Image (tube, coloured by chain):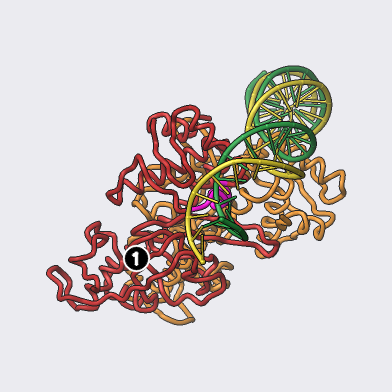
Chain colours: A red, B orange, C green, D yellow
DNA sequence: CGGGACATTGATTAAGATCAATTTAAGTGG
DNA sequence: CCACTTAAATTGATCTTAATCAATGTCCCG
């Protein structure tokens, strides 16, 4: 079934560009909307939605699943800049030059709404709200990366990992899942490449937090035993 | 004298939102433009253009001088996310929520063109080019911070500092100054807070690069003796 | 049930933080 | 204009954290 603003759980948040686009296409400016197809794209785990250097054609709103956004340099070093989850807008890295600067790779089978960028900007001319929403979405990313810079700069490894887990926990809660128990969709290596540490260090800190009864970790299965402690650790004390 | 698109060296780059705004105000869509006042704001060294929590009213295009953008957390830790120089657009961090998330502090006496944000978005409705330029400006920041994340994650202290100096050198060249000799407007502490290291480490690495005949550093006066070596060091090898 | 990717653990080393003491230079007021 | 004050920067000695090197364990999937 195709998704309409009524049936899309993301549209309810009021921050869904796909829903905006759908409304605009249907010509209505207020609910109720006639059913309106939003094309979706599905992506199997490990496949990439787009690659560095590809021409920006679409933005994508992640409907289900999760993704890693990776930048690499010629010498092979890589940085996972973020792990977008449900609701996230993907492809913004292509707006500066018209060419994506990241690889967007599915961490699990995922579904995204396809938002043709040219249509979005064209419609934004007549729709100040949509234009504003796009601006905000881009600006939000900027602010996110600023905060991540601070995490990498000011925190030690344990604090970084705790902060990362709290962030996932909060996103899970926001999506209606348990904030206490979830499955990590990414490898230890991905986490390491996200937080600027080595895979062995990630592993050791998981073990350490397990021993301290803050977490229960078995491979990708994670449960947070002591959320307060985790929050305390993950909130820069320095 | 007020600045017009003709007299503003920034407008020549074709990436000046202030010039766009000036053109729009004057009602002309192509050169030549009637003279049109763009209000400027001057800022003394050490003073802040805006502070975390202030309501976003204006964006600012840095006409002359330099600035540090700082985020802090309750416990007093701070991160210098960037050092905007001539041409940079300031205030973008306020777009997400309508409230600035950084402190913007002048590193020297500086001059900026004032761009009322509401006017910018209002005019963007009828001016696709301006809208596009705003989007790009925001997206550019995002990409900048992604690359900085990689620098912090993947490089050791020497590589980070080298990369930082190369970046300044390139910006100086782009502004028509010598890329080989310039004065650092920021303290060692600012650099440390930007690159995620301690002030003593910054100092030691300056000394080390001096001994290796890559740099000549005397306090804030810097000259690059061996640009190739500096580039080699500052380009992530890992 | 076997292969391979992923993860854990241990021992050692190296990079950078920390603690502490000077040195230098830029303002500032007499 | 000079002495004084103070912020900024440098340098040294030591300690801590995380990287590195190496081996082993475990689980998922075909």
Residue B166: quarter of image = bottom right
Of the pair B211 and A53, the residue shown nearer to us: A53
Q: How far from the left and from the top, in percent, is residue A10?
A: 27, 60
Please report the residue visible at 42 percent of the width from the left and 69 percent of the height from the top: A43
Quarter of the image that includes the N terminus of chain A:
bottom left
Q: Is residue B129 left or right of residue D9?
A: left
Q: How far from the left and from the top, in percent, is residue B90?
A: 48, 55
Residue range corresponding to the magenta coloring: A186-195
Residue B81 in view (yes/no): no
Q: Is residue A38 magenta?
A: no
Q: Which residue is mark 1?
A: B121
Residue A179, above or below B127:
above
Residue D6, above or below B211:
above
Q: Is residue A21 left or right of residue A74?
A: left
- Dominant SS of magenta comes to helix
Q: Is residue A187 magenta?
A: yes
Residue A91, above or below A208:
below
Dot 1: what SS? Answer: helix
Please report the residue visible at 70 percent of the width from the left and 48 percent of the height from the top: B161
Instruction: Specify the subunit that label 1 lies on.
Output: B
Please report the residue visible at 38 percent of the width from the left and 33 percent of the height from the top: A227
Q: How far from the left and from the top, in percent, is residue B213?
A: 87, 49
Residue B80 in view (yes/no): yes
Query: Which residue reaches farthest left?
Result: A32
Classed neighbour count for the residue bearing mark 1: other residues with Cα under 10 Å, few (<14), some (14–19), many (≥20): some
Q: How far from the left and from the top, in percent, is residue B115?
A: 42, 60
Q: Is residue A234 left or right of residue B225?
A: left
């Amino acid at each position: 079934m195709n998704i309409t603003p009524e049936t899309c759980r993301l549209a309810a948040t009021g921050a869904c560009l796909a829903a905006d686009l759908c409304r605009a296409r249907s010509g209505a400016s207020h609910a109720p909307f006639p059913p309106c197809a939003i094309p979706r794209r599905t992506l199997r785990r490990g496949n990439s939605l787009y690659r560095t250097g590809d021409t920006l054609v679409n933005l994508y709103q992640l409907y289900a699943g999760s993704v890693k956004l990776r930048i690499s340099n010629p010498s092979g070093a890589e940085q996972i800049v973020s792990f977008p989850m449900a609701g996230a807008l993907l492809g913004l890295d292509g707006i500066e030059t018209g060419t994506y600067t990241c690889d967007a790779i599915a961490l699990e089978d995922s579904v995204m709404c396809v938002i043709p960028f040219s249509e979005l900007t064209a419609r934004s001319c007549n729709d100040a709200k949509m234009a504003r929403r796009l601006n905000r979405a881009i600006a939000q990313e900027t602010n996110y990366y600023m905060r991540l810079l601070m995490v990498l700069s000011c925190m030690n490894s344990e604090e970084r990992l705790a902060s990362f887990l709290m962030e996932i926990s909060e996103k899970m809660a926001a999506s209606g899942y348990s904030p206490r128990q979830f499955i990590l969709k990414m490898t230890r290596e991905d986490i390491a490449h996200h937080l600027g540490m080595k895979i062995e260090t990630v592993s050791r800190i998981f073990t350490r937090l397990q021993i301290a009864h803050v977490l229960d970790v078995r491979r990708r299965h994670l449960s947070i035993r002591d959320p307060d402690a985790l929050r305390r650790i993950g909130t820069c004390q320095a």
